[in-house]
Amino acid sequence: MALLLLTLCLSAVIFLYFANNPLNHSRKFMIRRFINWFPLGMSYAFLYMGRYNLNVAKNALGEMMTKEQFGLIFAAGTITYGFSFLINGPIVDKIGGKKGILIATLGASVMNLCMGGATYLYMMGRLKTNMVVLFSVLYALNMFFQSYGAVSIIKVKAYWFHVRERGVFGAIFGTLISFGVYFAFDWGQAIVEASQLHSTSNTWFTRTIQHLFAIDTLTTNATWLVFVIPAFILILWALVDVVLLKDSPKEANFDDFDTADASSADDENVKITMKLVLKKVFSTRIMYTIALVDFTSGVLRNGIMQWYLVFAHEMKTQNPSYYLGTEFFTKNWGLLLCLTGIFGGFISGIVSDRVYNSRRGPPAAINNMIMIILLIVMAFFLMKDPTIVGIAAVMMTLAVIGVHSLMSGTAAADFGGKKMTATASGIVDGCVYLGSGIQSLAIGYLSAKSWQYWPLFLIPFAILGLYLSISMWHELPEATKKYILKMELEENNKSLAKQAVTESPL
């Protein structure tokens, strides 16, 4: 059933992609662009599987990895990711998105294999070193390579999508994140269940996993497979990217076109250096605002996505009757986040392009307002009604993916420009994971005292996100303003001409 729903969602995404063609690109171009972004996007989605599999492993390992230890490990990775943009953003602007995504997929696959090996040694009693230190180092290295993924996909997007198309592409970007969350949580959980020594599951997937990895011949659960399997999937997508991915339309035998972003006014003969890139990006006020909005979204997104399953897992022993109300959400967590994330991304992207003339601030502000309300509801009903809390947590994803796809996936590219988009989006995406690291440390510590602190900690960040989004309500790159004005003048001229023909005597 889940696969059917995902197939329908993916079909809808593909349909909306082809239906959204405001620049009247040729059919041939639209198909080639699809062939370009689809494998790139799936690579990014499976990077998420190789990122949030740590969350699934934590619950599978139980007391072998406490939530405080998990918080430290996750924070080490996310903070590393946050600062990595200083290195990988300018590098990807120089080498291109194709090489960047290959660095991301192959590097993350190697580190996932290492984490799988460490888990195997730990569970077999052969690992004598401190688990927190080892996993913090490996996960930080994993996240360093992972950080090439987002800037690479945005870099490629900046050459293939006009500003007026990027709201919908931001929705596609949010969809890819949502698929990645589904792969991480639901596929990851399926791997964990299939890898149990005495699994009660008898699905074809469980039988295949147990046959391939000879689980029944071992003496412990094969939890390490939650790292190993995503590693091999990433290698496969890297091979596909080598064959199909092109950095720009020109490399795919099409003419490049003016995307009407912040690079439109740049002199084509100006040599783009790292110094020039960093100076332009860091001297722009709007980039700081976008980065801070996405910082709050990082706190909020992972503050819910990372901790809801941990919260529900603790309730299983502390309050079994309450836990019964969370079972629907825990069993379908990845699917629910995927579906709401897709919905939220597309609503935000379409509203941005169609209602607000490609301004990203208004829908981001609306989403933050929704999150404030949902967090207040969570705080009030946290220990009273598990169903309301579960619904509020899922709906939080709808709103926060909308913000993240608009900021990281769209606004950063708009204001950074295609020539500097990797550095610009790297700054923004880096701030997302700095926020993730802060919430990981804070909620890991606070929830050990009382889970009531969980939603209360998140509310101020939603309020800050609302304030910052409102402050950029009217912001657009100058080239985009000129393009929109030009289109409006053309539409007015067409209307006047049509009216003149209608009113003229026969």
Image (cartoon, grey):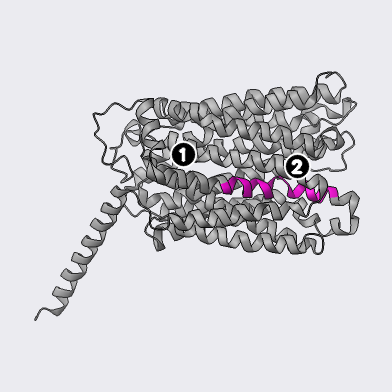
Residue 303 is left or right of residue 132, and the answer is left
The reply to whether the magenta stretch includes residue 347 is no
Q: Position of residue 167 (x, y in %)?
A: 43, 52
Label 1 secondary element: helix
Q: Position of residue 434 (x, y in %)?
A: 59, 38
Nearer the observer: mark 2 or 1; the answer is: 2
**Is most of the magenta stretch helix, strand or loop?**
helix
Q: Secondary structure at mark 2?
A: helix
For the C terminus, which image quadrant?
A: bottom left
> 320 or 416, which is in the foreground?
416
x and y, in percent, of residue 355 in the image: 41, 63
Which is more N-terminal, label 1 or label 2?
1
Range of residues picked out in magenta? 296-314
Rendered image quadrant of residue 238: top right
Q: Are marks 2 and 1 in contact (CB under 8 Å)?
A: no
Residue reaching furthest to the bottom: 505
Question: Which numbered tag is attached to residue 425?
Answer: 1
Residue 384 screen position, x and y as percent? 82, 64
Q: Residue at x 38, y 46 (%)?
A: 30
User: Residue placed at 77% from the left, 51% from the top?
Assistant: 331
Does residue 167 appear to the left or right of 462 in the view shown? left
Q: Nearer the viewer, residue 383 or 464?
A: 464
The amino acid sitting under disc 1 is Ser
